[in-house]
Amino acid sequence: MMKVALIGMGSVGKGVAGVIARKDLGLTITGIADSKSGCVDPDGLDIANLLLNKSRNGCCGDREISAADVIKKADYDALIEVTPTNALSGEPAIGYIKTALLRKKHVVTSNKGPIALAYKELHALAQKNGVALRYEATVAGAVPIMHTLEHGLAGNEILALYGVLNGTCNYILTRMADEGLTYEQALMEAREMGYAEADPTYDVQGIDAAIKLVILANTIWGNGVRLNDVDRTGIDLLTADALRLAEDEGCTIRLIAEAIPRKHILRVSPRILEKNHPLVVDGTLNALTLETDMAKEITLIGRGAGSTETASAIIGDLLFIKDRYARRT
């Protein structure tokens, strides 16, 4: 049985906890914390009861126990870090992850901030301490991009990548194209559907997609790029007329993140694509095309957000660690 500690009890954290409670995966949660409270039991926590408490009073445990306490003191093999992303500093998640790695604990995270801002340092720390740092859930939700790069395309040289990496933007552009809505109308609908935040800046200005592009570029090429290195244009100034003009040519518009090292391109911007292009996906779907030397072009498509979908990626990483750790010992 692999013991895990879970930090973060938003929609993703609750999704992960629920999956572990429902499925017999050989995982048990021995420590858990939200922003206000925490709970620790080396024999395993009653997750159903904790989730009930969380829904009733907003806390998952004892207000005297903090996330830092759980990370420093709980008995666990792997830390699941799913707190909200801070794109400016990456904190407090970077500190949480470092503490776990220094304790020689594996880390699985969905948090884009630490991986975009401090990947090289965190990866080196994990290697030094003989543990894994896994982050499949940081890019495209349930789509197994990192596993594909690491295993399915092992031995291939990745020459370039192109992707639809933000579901909110894709939903807005889909609705503008399909129904002739203005940007403002489509954004309002996206808010009503729960796909867009009250302040959608992070999504519609391409920041979220750019952070994911940075994570992919650093994972594949190890080139140490940062958010400021991405040439970024969002969709917030896009008009319904632009979509109509594209439609007249049998095309549509999608927000595309692309990295082409040989051309020194690292960019997020609206692009005109033919309607049968593999990256023209509808609604909140994500899609990524990897251009390789041997396999040529591989396109992955799937759900890029959602509590259960993101939990899928986190569970996949945990079970990968569990299997590899078991075989080592």
Image (tube, rainbow, N blue to C red):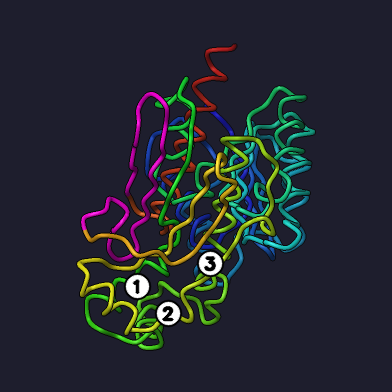
Q: Secondary structure at mark 1?
A: helix
- What's the magenta region? 276-301
Identify the mark nearer the N-term, 1 or 3. Answer: 1
Residue picked out by circle 1: 173
Q: Name the amino acid type tagged 2.
A: Leu
- Label 2 Cα neighbours within 10 Å, binned few <14 / some 14-19 / many ≥20: some
The residue mark sitting in front, 2 or 1, is 2
Residue picked out by circle 3: 206
Relative to 224, say whether 111 is above or below. below
Task: Using the numbered discs, state the Cα–Cα distance from disc 1 to disc 3 in whole angstroms.
Answer: 13 Å
The residue mark sitting in front, 2 or 3, is 2
Would residue 69 be counted in the magenta stretch? no
- Label 3 Cα neighbours within 10 Å, binned few <14 / some 14-19 / many ≥20: many
Circles 1 and 3: CB atoms closer than 8 Å: no
Q: Secondary structure at mark 2?
A: loop
Residue picked out by circle 2: 238
State the residue at coordinates (59%, 53%).
Answer: 82
Identify the mark nearer the N-term, 2 or 3. Answer: 3
Residue 127 spot, x, y in % from top left: 72, 25
Relative to 73, say whether 62 is above or below. below
Which quadrant of the structure image shows residue 242? bottom left
Q: Name the amino acid type tagged 3.
A: Gly
For the residue pair 238 and 53, the one nearer the viewer reads as: 238
- Label 1 Cα neighbours within 10 Å, binned few <14 / some 14-19 / many ≥20: many
State the residue at coordinates (52%, 47%).
Answer: 259
For the residue pair 204 and 92, the one nearer the viewer reads as: 204
* Residue 9 visible at all: yes
Task: Using the numbered discs, state the Cα–Cα distance from disc 2 to disc 1 in whole angstroms.
Answer: 9 Å
Circles 2 and 1: CB atoms closer than 8 Å: yes
Q: Name the amino acid type tagged 1.
A: Leu
State the residue at coordinates (41%, 39%).
Answer: 290
Residue 144 spot, x, y in % from top left: 41, 40
